[in-house]
Image (tube, rainbow, N blue to C red):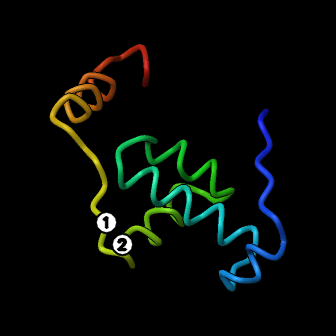
Amino acid sequence: MLSLEIPGDTLEAAHMTAAEAKLELAVALFARERLSMGKAAELAGIGVAVFQRHLGARQIAPHYSVADALADRDALSDPATS
């Protein structure tokens, strides 16, 4: 695990808690398509459903490509995964 240190006075200047800063970083990386939704939620320290609500509140659409949809279809139709 890699740790990132943010000086307390920087968080105070931004009027943010550490949890809020992690969420902001996760949202920004997700919006720039640098992290998947699952990894962004993990970085923020919250569940995917909660992360999705944060994205919705900011009007950030989830990234769901045709390839993602096909992979989901295949996974759902594969009897080995049932």
Q: Is residue 73 left or right of residue 11?
A: left
Q: CA distance from mark 1 to mark 2?
A: 6 Å
Residue at image coords 40%, 67%: 55
Residue 19 in the image: x percent, y percent? 72, 68
Are circles 1 and 2 on residues that touch, CB within 8 Å? yes
- For mark 2, give the secondary structure: helix
Residue at image coords 15%, 34%: 66
Up the image or down, 51 lies above or below 39; here it is below
Q: Is residue 65 left or right of residue 3?
A: left
Labels 1, 2: front one: 1
Up the image or down, 74 lies above or below 56; here it is above
Residue at image coords 54%, 66%: 50
Q: Quadrant of the C terminus?
A: top left
- For mark 1, give the secondary structure: loop
Residue 36 in the image: x percent, y percent? 43, 41
Residue 37 in the image: x percent, y percent? 45, 48
Question: Which residue of the protein is positioned furthest toward the right in this rendering?
Answer: 8
Q: Quadrant of the N terminus?
A: top right
Up the image or down, 36 lies above or below 10; here it is above
Q: Label 2 neighbourhood size at 10 Å, few (<14), some (14-19), many (20+)?
A: few
Up the image or down, 42 lies above or below 57; here it is above
Q: Which mark is residue 56?
A: 2
Question: Which residue of the protein is positioned furthest toward the left in this rendering?
Answer: 66
Q: Label 1 neighbourhood size at 10 Å, few (<14), some (14-19), many (20+)?
A: some
Give the labeled residue for mark 1.
Answer: 60
Residue at image coords 69%, 85%: 15
Residue 45 position by quadrant: bottom right
Residue 32 in the image: x percent, y percent? 35, 50
